[in-house]
């Protein structure tokens, strides 16, 4: 007997509208950025970047090269009847995407880059984003976030953001400075 694939498990057990392609996609509105607690995203308080909002409205959740953005994400457990999924990397894209989705639903409902249920005339549409689920400790999740934000083409973390994440790691009991240094931008 085979188990459920990741998208089916998120749908059946988590109450989320996940879709399986070659990767799992979730509606942007069904994932959140942690604003407090041990894995709070240090960029969560930044305002939405208007240029990024405009880009997403025109192109969807895709890079300038046309590849879909993939968010590092983590399951945090059930909240009510839905699984709580938090963003590891992509806080700016999440905030800008949420604003773009809101504007598109008001001005261009049921038009690309939104995805909607064609059988439901009241469905205005939503933006989907690819996710890669991380399964590990809080400290491992923060390390993975730093590493993901250090990839070429991403907006590099400022020294302040990196310092906040190192403090998060220390608060989480991670004092393996070699592991921390290994994920820092070069």
Image (tube, rainbow, N blue to C red):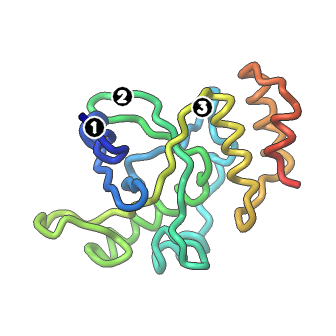
Q: Nearer the viewer, mark 1 or mark 3?
A: 1
Relative side of 178 to 118, left or right: right
Locate residue 147, reporting x and y percent.
73, 48
- Alpha-carbon neighbours of circle 2 within 10 Å: few (<14), some, or many (≥20)? few
The residue wearing badge 1 is 2
Label 2 to label 3: alpha-carbon separation: 18 Å
Q: Nearer the viewer, mark 2 or mark 1?
A: 1
Looking at the rendered structure, the secondary structure element under dot 1 is loop
Q: Confirm or deny contact between disc 2 and disc 3 (CB under 8 A).
A: no
Q: Earlier in the sequence, mark 2 or mark 1?
A: 1
The residue wearing badge 2 is 78
Q: Which residue corresponds to the image point at 41% horizontal and 35% vertical from the top-left?
A: 84
Q: Nearer the viewer, mark 2 or mark 3?
A: 2
Q: Is residue 179 above or below residue 65?
A: above
131 or 85, nearer to the observer: 131
The residue wearing badge 3 is 36
Q: Which residue corresponds to the image point at 37% horizontal and 44% vertical from the top-left?
A: 6
- Alpha-carbon neighbours of circle 1 within 10 Å: few (<14), some, or many (≥20)? few
Q: Is residue 141 above or below residue 93?
A: above
Quadrant of the snapshot with the N terminus: top left
- Alpha-carbon neighbours of circle 3 within 10 Å: few (<14), some, or many (≥20)? few
């Amino acid at each position: 007997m085979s188990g459920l694939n990741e998208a089916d498990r998120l749908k059946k057990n988590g109450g989320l509208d996940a879709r399986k392609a070659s990767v799992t996609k979730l509606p942007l509105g069904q994932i959140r950025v942690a604003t407090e607690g041990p894995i709070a995203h240090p960029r969560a308080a930044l305002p939405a970047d208007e240029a990024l909002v405009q880009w997403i409205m025109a192109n969807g959740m895709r890079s300038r090269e046309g590849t879909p953005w993939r968010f590092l994400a983590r399951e945090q457990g059930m909240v009510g009847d839905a699984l709580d999924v938090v963003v590891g990397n992509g806080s700016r894209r999440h905030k800008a995407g949420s604003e773009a989705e809101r504007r598109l639903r008001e001005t261009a409902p049921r038009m690309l880059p939104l995805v909607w249920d064609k059988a439901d005339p009241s469905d205005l549409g939503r933006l989907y984003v690819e996710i890669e689920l991380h399964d590990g400790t809080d400290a491992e999740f923060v390390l993975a976030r730093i590493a993901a934000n250090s990839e070429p083409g991403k907006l590099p973390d400022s020294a302040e953001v990196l310092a906040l994440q190192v403090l998060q790691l220390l608060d989480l009991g991670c004092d393996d400075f070699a592991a921390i240094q290994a994920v820092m931008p070069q």
